[in-house]
Amino acid sequence: MSHLEQKIIEEIRAEGPINFEKFMEIALYYPGHGYYAKESTKIGRTGDFYTSPHLHPVFGAMIGRQMEEMWNLMGKPGIFHVVEMGAGMGYLARDLLEYLKGSRRREDFLRCIRYVLVELNPSIKAAQQTLLNDHLNRVEWVSELKDIEPFSGCLLSNELLDAFPVRLVEMEDELTEIYVAYDPERGLVEIKKPGSREIAEYFKEFSIGPPEGYRTEVNLRIRDWLHDVNGKLLKGFILTVDYGYAARDYYSDDRSRGTLLCYHRHRVNEDPYRNIGEQDLTAHINFSSLKKWGEEIGLKTAGFSSQGTYLVSLGIDEVIKELYGEHPDPFETAKIKGLVLPQGMGESHQVMIQYKGEGGMNLSGFSIRNQAKRL
């Protein structure tokens, strides 16, 4: 039995069964032992999963292109903050800054950038600092969002919200919530309790009426995160890239077992109670909640689209020519296609951009098919 599993059992013995959200929080973030909080965690091809920046540097270049457009729409302020949360090993930050550094016509924008990485894990922070060694003059680190002074610019995240702890619910005769208990003979086991009023209100808010036997997730942490971000963002954008759907697709009848998955050494399983602290736990996000809760606190929705459509509309063909010429290497092209095509990350990942302030809504990444109204 691992140290982390012992801590969970101690928690259950002291407080009684814990809801799945609490279990997931401990499994991922318990200091020194949770998946994202221990020194041995590796993200990328040598770890348990990889993200778009690991697939190809052109993804970071495209986000750099987007940051420049945002800066222009904001009137080219003298300081433009890029605040990245959940930056992994730092590849997105490196590729973004390398792209801007490699273009003379972007020198004015590059001089205005202040890049802030929000990273609590000391070993991951050290890896980021090594990777970003050539850019340390414009990069700084904070442990938590609350440590940042109010800023203008863009709050950026790539596959962050899907790692927020979620509630697990199941519909029987009535809505129930999954709790984790301990049985000396069977170990950690699930039990069901009546669903809370908060969850019932969430289902009503998004017109969710699941049939009997339907099991799914509810991510309430997104609402708190939006409030925290809104409290720090004076003016500018929130750019979110993640797995997810609009509410009607997330809670459709054909997704009756939810989206919760576990990643261990690049293998996927559906058992969160094994490899505790050694595997990633993730659930897709309800982008309708991101939009609705954002608009309730004054954040405008600039656009929502699949990653592939967004990158094409933003001009990925132009960036490829800029970086690799008219005839890029076929090996590079194949990897880039993984960012855009439906069978890669082009359809599985969605992009949403929200805005605080006046104007700033005409983003080229949504000019082909702006899906904000479809949420």
Image: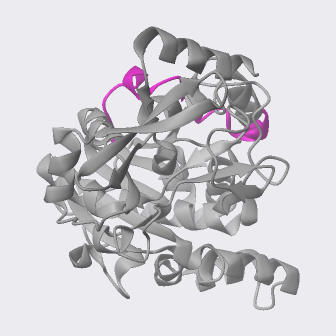
Q: Estimate the x, y position of residue 76 in percent, counting from the top left.
A: 35, 54
Please check the rendered image and state whether residue 168 is part of the magenta-colored stretch, yes or no.
no
Q: How many marks?
A: 0
Residue 265, compared with residue 15, is above or below; it is below
Please check the rendered image and state whether residue 132 is part of the magenta-colored stretch, yes or no.
yes
The residue lying toward the viewer, choosing from 104 and 184, is 184
Where is residue 280, by image quadrant?
top right
Of all residues, the one furthest to the top in this rendering is: 14
Q: Estimate the x, y position of residue 369 in percent, counting from the top left.
A: 35, 86
The quarter of the rendered structure image containing the C terminus is bottom left
Residue 180, compared with residue 92, is above or below; it is above
The residue lying toward the viewer, choosing from 60 and 143, is 143
Residue at left offset 58%, top offset 21%: 30
Q: Estimate the x, y position of residue 252 in percent, counting from the top left.
A: 35, 74
**Residue 88 shows in the view:** no
Residue 329, compared with residue 224, is above or below; it is below
Q: 225 left or right of 259?
A: left
Q: Estimate the x, y position of residue 49 in percent, counting from the top left.
A: 72, 53
The residue lying toward the viewer, choosing from 344 and 248, is 248
The quarter of the rendered structure image containing the N terminus is top right
Q: 293 left or right of 30?
A: left
Residue at left offset 85%, top offset 86%: 330
Colouring style:
one colour
**Residue 214 shows in the view:** yes
Residue at left offset 62%, top offset 55%: 96
Of all residues, the one furthest to the front in this rendering is: 185
The residue lying toward the viewer, choosing from 329 and 299, is 299
Q: Which region is colored magenta? A: 130-152
Q: 285 left or right of 117?
A: left
Residue at left offset 73%, top offset 74%: 323
Residue 195, compared with residue 28, is above or below; it is below
Q: 179 left or right of 225?
A: right
